[in-house]
Each structure stands twice: as structure tokens, then as C-alpha cells.
Amino acid sequence: MDARTPARHAEAVIEVRDLVVGFGDRVILNGLNLDVYRGEILGFVGTSGGGKSVLTRTILGLVRKRSGSVKVFGQELGTLNEKERSLMERRWGVLFQQGALFSSLTVKQNIQFPLREYLHMSQAMMDDVAFAKIAMVGLKSDVAEKMPSELSGGMIKRAALARSLALDPEILFLDEPTSGLDPIGAGDFDELIRTLQQTLGLTVFMVTHDLDSLHTVCDRIAALADGKVIAEGTIATMMAAKHPWLQAYFHGSRARAVFGAQG
């Protein structure tokens, strides 16, 4: 077993059981089961359009499930009242694929948005938090007053990450965090995620198609196909799996460039 892989008796902070999600006549997730363990970085991969982001949005409550169970920190999300739901949402942060910064707000104001929504803080304290988060993600302080339109793609990702960390979450959801970044920028972002995870004790659920990310920062991988998790474990587990999609994904030309040294 890989040294970074959590033991099977580790605490599952996200538990998904028999989850069914669909739109109209199309079933996207069909009896999906998945555990995410405290303190791990789980890479979630799957076929294009197969439902990776749908799972994230279902856990977050942005997509309605047809049946099944989604528990976070042992609580069934569908049974929470408004106050309990608000308290739960303060325990996670989300980085959407394109950053999803508010275009009419500065970086500082974007980071302060969840603080205004969930907490009662003075402006001075919110400013302190914003500048601390900006530094935490490796941006310079002068970025605080910039608009999203003034930022590069990599800076937008980091600013959005700073916002996702504003409430000091325990779980971080990342949706294709390195998409649109050049290889150097993607590698730097992966390193940042690993550093933050180790420093802050985060649990990270990362939807990704980036083979380098899977290899360098993920403790464990879960693979989605046909509406279900078809395999989970280390890179070695994925490469040994016989499912046709996993064979194509982990043994294709791009995979050989990343994993070639492993044989």
C-alpha cells in the first residue's frame, strides 16, 4: 500500500451510498458508492460527461438526487434544516472549474463575500482575513484591489482558491483545478494544494483529468464510469484494473509519458 493511502478504518468525512442522479430520461449516477477519508487528497476521474462534476454538485446540494444517501461529517445532508445547512456549508470550501469569481468585485471583495454571508465581522477584520488568504495562495498583496479581468488564468485560480479558504474549511472541493493552466502553472498549483492540505489538515476532493495531478498530489483515486465508481485505490491499482476505460486512460500515450518510469 502506498504510504500516503489512508487506512481503511480511517474516518470517512464524506459517505455516498446508492446515489442516483438524473436529468429527464437520462440517469447520470446510478447506484454510486464512495467514501472520502479525513485528511486525504482524493482524485476523482472518469469519462467525459460521465458525471464527475455532477457528483460534486450533488454533494454540495446544487443538484437534487433521486435516491440514495449523502452524508458529510456523519450527517445526512437531505435532513438538515436551514440553520444546520448553513453551519455545514461553513465547513467546506469550493473551487469551481473556471474560478467563478464575481466579475464586478475586486479580489479582496470576492474573498470577503463568504465572510459577509456567514459571519459578522468588522471591515478591518475582513480585510485582515482577505490579505492573509491572498498570501496563503502565493499572490502578492497588490492583487487585492484588482478586478478578475486584470488577472491571468493562474492568478484567477489562486484568487478563487483564496476565496474557498476564507472560512477555514475542513473539506476543499476542487473541480478541474489545473484545467487551462500550462504545465508549469499546473505543477505549481498542485504543489500549492499539497502544501495547503498538509499545513491546514484539509480533506480534498479533487475532480480532475490531469494525470500529473493524480501522480503527484493524490493519496487515492476513485474512477467513475457507467454511473458508478468502478475502481478506487492507488495509481498502481488503477493501472492494474481491467475496465476498458481505465486501460485506455492509464495506459495511453499521455499516461506512458507520466507513468513510464513505473513500468
Image (spheres, helix red, strand yellow):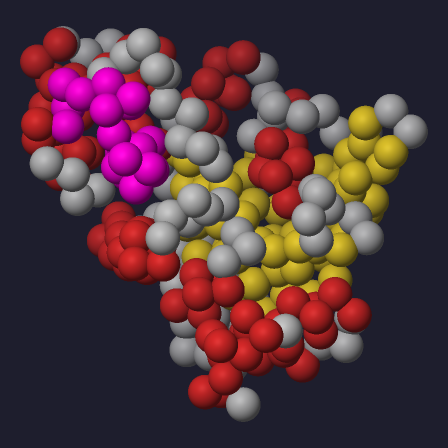
Q: Pick whichever, 23 or 8, lies toward us.
A: 23
Residue found 29% across the figure and 22% down from its top = 149
Q: Pick whichever, 243 or 29, lies toward us.
A: 243
Q: Please indicate whether residue 96 sits to the left or right of residue 46 in the image.
A: left
The residue sitting at the right extreme is 25
List x then y, in percent, for residue 242.
77, 77
Q: Please indicate whether residue 126 sits to the left or right of residue 241 in the image.
A: left
Residue 113 found in image quarter: top left
Q: Please indicate whether residue 262 sits to the left or right of residue 143 in the image.
A: right
Q: Is residue 232 visible?
A: yes
Residue 70 found in image quarter: top right
Residue 72 found in image quarter: top right
Q: Where is 61 relative to 227, above or below?
A: above
Q: Is residue 18 visible?
A: no
Q: Pick whichever, 9 or 257, lies toward us.
A: 257
List x then y, in percent, for residue 64.
71, 24
Q: Main secondary structure of the magenta part?
A: helix
List x then y, in percent, for residue 159.
27, 32
Tell me the magenta residue range: 143-162
Q: Where is 158 relative to 43, above or below?
A: above
Q: Please indicate whether residue 127 sits to the left or right of residue 11 in the image.
A: left
Residue found 65% across the figure and 67% down from its top = 249
